[in-house]
Amino acid sequence: MLSEPRSGRLAAWGNALLAGLVPPDDAAHAIVGPDAVHRVGGLAGETGPVGLTLALGRLRRLGATGFRVALPVSGHPLGLSGPPDFNARALEAGEAVVVSGAAYGLVPEVSEAGPAGDVHVEVVWHCLPVREAPPADVPSLGEAERELAEALRDATAVLSRLDVAGSGPVAQAAVEAYRARAERGREVLAPGYPPRAVRVLELAQRVGLLVSVAEGAGHGGAVSSSEIAARSEALRPVERVARRAQVAAYNAYVEERSR
């Protein structure tokens, strides 16, 4: 939850491109982010993977009107609508993008290349057919914001009770990384998103940070395996709420256009 999902970058900047708010090359550059290169494989009419700029243009010509995010985990197909083959690929990757208006989905396959000390990340997005149906378990922005406020209180209470908040080098590194990104004034979402979506995504990332701190803080005050298990059990619904809110924020562009 600390890092921005690649599916979020693709959906957000893909939506900004469709809205005419950014040029194709700028959208592709923002989607690639810190990775070395992104390509898209399986597009109709192409024999192999192609660059993002070409792929986004092709999807628009195929009828794409928006991009939605899915962040599924086992037992929670968040943002997916089928078919089973696509859902399985998305679940394995932990994320996917579903194209509105074109009945396609994109699932990232991430690989590393290069010698030790100079490793770079390459991503191939596999384009697959999807079922045109409402995505699973995605809340409205209003619902997500209310759930997050409660989840933030719950997460803080759990961490305080278990004496793990801010403890350990992993927790401290996570907090410092979050602060560094905030200080750089990073753009949370692409142009065209409503302010409420930005607010919800920022809050979801804060809640996700707390969950990551708890999971990476070692034993903290929990001195037995049963107490560690209790910590995980208590934070599981908090993590679920944060994931749902992330999806709601990234999908806000498409939801607003559909109203």
Image (cartoon, rainbow, N blue to C red):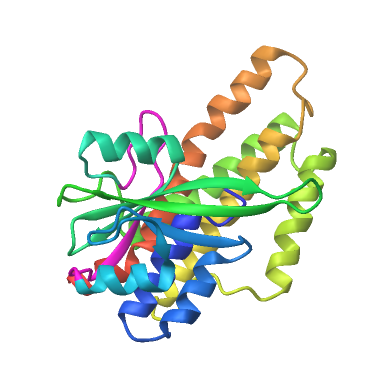
Tell me residue 57's x, y (percent).
31, 74
Q: Nearer the viewer, residue 147 or 8?
A: 8
- First to last magenta residue range: 62-79
**Res. 94 visible in picture:** yes
Tell me residue 108's x, y (percent).
44, 49
| Image: 36 above or below 235 | below
Q: Nearer the viewer, residue 38 or 253?
A: 38
Looking at the image, which residue is at 55% across and 57% down? Answer: 4
Toward the right, the furthest residue is: 169
Q: Nearer the viewer, residue 74 or 17?
A: 17
Q: Main secondary structure of the magenta part?
A: loop
| Image: 142 above or below 124 | below
Residue 51 located left or right of residue 60: right
Looking at the image, which residue is at 36% across and 38% down? Answer: 89
**Res. 256 visible in picture:** no
Residue 138 located left or right of residue 94: left
The image quarter containing residue 217 is top right
Residue 133 located left or right of residue 33: left
Toward the left, the furthest residue is: 132
Tell me residue 247's x, y (percent).
39, 54
